[in-house]
């Protein structure tokens, strides 16, 4: 403490002793203010109120349910509630756009998938959002895993068999996905391109893409684990391959698509946390630390396995670079699928 500051404190201290006898002890609280300021008091008070989390997911959806389980853990670590504000709609644009407009004070963050930061770039002529500029990447939370799964009555027992069947029956083998421009569509387009096959993409918008494969209306699907597991457990579906970078413990012996089809690139299927633009680094670091600690919890890890999610928890810098790489990959897949922006 410099001489001027020492004199200031000593002078006021003398006054307190003098005034205290007159019943003016409230002055003591004023004397502490300059000392507290010089020592940076209050810097560790964050968060002092609940954290609002704008979410692209519909209430009760798979992503919403899993994130809420994480939010419980994050709340415990931060000492404040994480309040989910569901803003589904417009292909996740409602939630993301809202997050770009909030004050970057650390009390509002966004949970969103790759839909707007990556996929929308190749599907829409409307407003685009650069997630590394108009948002602040904090960390990727988890990755959903796509599976190549067939009806058990389909003659192909492996991905190699399926490719051979497609080559022998060009334009006749159909696969279902959750819609045009979805990650299943991108994966199917990449599979066709790299195997020099011609298959029929059957997009669904009502969630029946797996149920119709179980019913025998289509031979196979490219869908995420939660949609497929019930059919697998019931013996109605067979998993032929995993459209991801690595195998899954839940399906021992089942290869990745890349093991069978070299150069196959899984489309991005992540969900992450972002801040609004201009979020100070101290808040980015704070939330990143909460995420990393929360995802290391054994109960969280177990739920991720049971729900078919792969936990990530990377740094803000790694997440930003991941988004850039995913844009490159998705661009190649979009061109392979001949997908054109349509609005």
Image: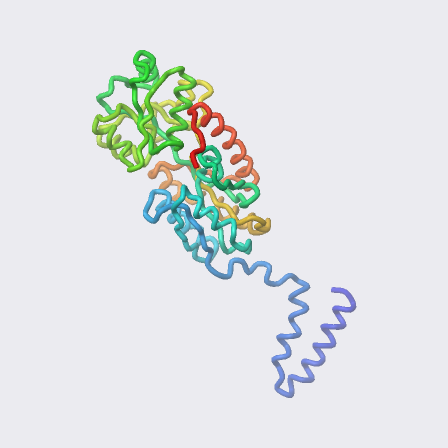
Among all residues in the image, which is located at the extreme right?
A: 3
Give the quarter of the figure containing the N terminus: bottom right
Instruction: Indicate how the structure is coloured in the image.
Output: rainbow
Q: How many marks?
A: 0
Is 288 in front, or is 64? 64
Whether 99 is drawn above or below 343: the answer is: below
- Left or right: 315, with 162 as reference point: right
Pick out the residue farthest to the top: 168
Percent across and percent down for residue 261 are 42, 18
Q: Is residue 313 left or right of residue 214?
A: right
Which residue is situated farthest in the bottom direction here?
22
From the top left corner, tell me how far across and down residue 314 is, in percent: 51, 39
| Front residue of 209 and 258 | 209
Q: Is residue 94 left or right of residue 211?
A: right
At a point 42% along the width and 43% down the height, the residue shown is: 92
| Quarter assignment of residue 220 | top left
Residue 60 screen position, x and y as percent: 32, 47
Q: Residue at x 65, y 70 (%)?
A: 33
Observer-nearest of 78 and 124: 124
Quadrant of the snapshot with the C terminus = top left
Quarter of the figure with residue 324: top right
- Image location (x, y in percent) of residue 251: 33, 28
């Amino acid at each position: 403490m410099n001489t001027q500051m020492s004199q200031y404190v000593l002078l006021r201290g003398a006054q307190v002793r003098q005034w205290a006898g007159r019943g003016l002890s409230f002055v003591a609280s004023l004397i502490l203010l300059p000392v507290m300021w010089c020592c940076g008091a209050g810097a560790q008070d964050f968060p002092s109120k609940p954290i609002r989390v704008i979410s692209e997911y519909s209430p009760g959806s798979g992503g919403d349910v899993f994130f809420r389980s994480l939010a419980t853990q994050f709340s415990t670590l931060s000492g404040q509630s994480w309040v989910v504000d569901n803003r589904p709609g417009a292909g996740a644009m409602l939630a993301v756009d809202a997050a770009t407009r909030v004050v970057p004070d650390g009390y509002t963050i966004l949970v969103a998938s790759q839909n707007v930061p990556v996929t929308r770039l190749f599907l829409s002529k409307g407003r685009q959002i650069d997630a590394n500029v108009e948002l602040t990447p904090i960390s990727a939370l988890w990755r959903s895993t796509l599976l190549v799964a067939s009806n058990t009555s389909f003659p192909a027992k492996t991905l190699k068999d399926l490719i051979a069947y497609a080559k022998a029956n060009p334009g006749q083998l159909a696969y279902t996905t959750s819609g045009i421009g979805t990650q299943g569509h991108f994966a199917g387009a990449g599979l066709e391109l790299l195997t020099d096959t011609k298959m029929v993409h059957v997009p669904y918008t009502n969630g029946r893409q797996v149920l119709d494969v179980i019913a025998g209306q289509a031979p196979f699907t490219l869908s995420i684990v939660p949609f497929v597991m019930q059919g697998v457990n019931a013996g109605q579906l067979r998993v032929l391959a995993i459209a991801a970078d690595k195998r899954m413990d839940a399906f021992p012996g089942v290869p990745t698509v890349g093991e069978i089809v070299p150069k196959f690139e899984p489309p991005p299927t992540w969900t992450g946390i972002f801040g609004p633009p201009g979020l100070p680094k101290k808040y980015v670091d704070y939330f990143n630390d909460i995420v990393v600690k929360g995802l290391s919890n054994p109960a969280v890890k177990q739920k991720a396995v049971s729900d078919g999610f792969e936990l990530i928890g990377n740094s803000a810098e790694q997440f930003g670079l991941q988004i850039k790489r995913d844009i490159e990959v998705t661009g190649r897949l979009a061109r392979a699928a001949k997908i054109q922006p349509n609005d």
